[in-house]
Amino acid sequence: MHIQIINVAQKMPAWADQACEDFLRRMPRELTPRLVTLPLAARGPRQAAAGARQREAEAILGKLAPGSFNLALDERGACWSSNDWAHNLQRWMLEQPRVNLVIGGPDGLAEDCLEACQQRVALGKMTLPHALVKVVLIEQLYRAWTIIKGHPYHRD
């Protein structure tokens, strides 16, 4: 199974990179996500957020292989528990050879990008800093794997 995390962002702070690397090191090789960071589209006083979102969507859509299962992180998506992440990860491991987890830029994801995704998930009702979203997502993937394997990292 190939998991790809597609992230539209500028350079992440060192603490976020360190946290992501720590959880990625713990994951088994067959589940370690490939991280793809796409640059933010130019934004300015004369450039509308919708235009930037659309340029970012074009880059994201170019990274989605045909036949992949695509999940968008979106504030209007379903809120999953850690056990929900584990259930879905286990299902993906059995049914999906390629999974893309998509994190949009500061203005979110364009509609055509959302439509290319079969599911939408929110990491909660809070607004989180972009760097933290990536850390939380990777940690939840690791936690889901530990739940599946009965590893003591996750305690009910």
Image: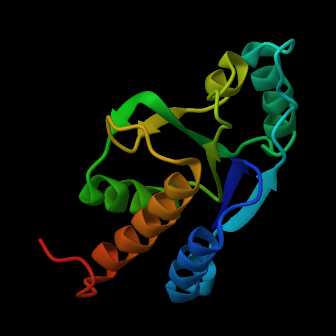
> Is residue 114 visible from the viewing direction of this image?
yes
Residue 68, above or below 106: below
Q: Residue at x 44, y 30 (%)?
A: 75
Answer left or right for 81 relative to 102.
left
Given residues 133 and 116, the one toward you in this image is 133
Q: Quadrant of the C terminus?
A: bottom left
Image x and y of residue 97, in percent: 65, 59
Given residues 156 and 150, the one toward you in this image is 156
Q: Residue at x 79, y 39 (%)?
A: 60
Q: Residue at x 16, y 77 (%)?
A: 155
Residue 39, above or below 139: above
Image x and y of residue 36, in percent: 77, 58
Image x and y of residue 83, in percent: 25, 59
Counting every numbered tag in the picture gives: 0
Q: Residue at x 77, y 51 (%)?
A: 10
Q: Residue furthest left?
A: 156
Q: Residue furthest front?
A: 45
Residue 15, located in which quarter of the rendered image?
bottom right
Given residues 71 and 16, the one toward you in this image is 16
Q: Quadrant of the N terminus?
A: bottom right
Look at the image and name its color scheme: rainbow
Answer left or right for 54 relative to 7.
right
Image x and y of residue 84, in percent: 29, 52
Given residues 48 and 96, the one toward you in this image is 48
Residue 40, above or below 21: above
> Is residue 94 visible from the viewing direction of this image?
no
Answer left or right for 88 relative to 120.
left
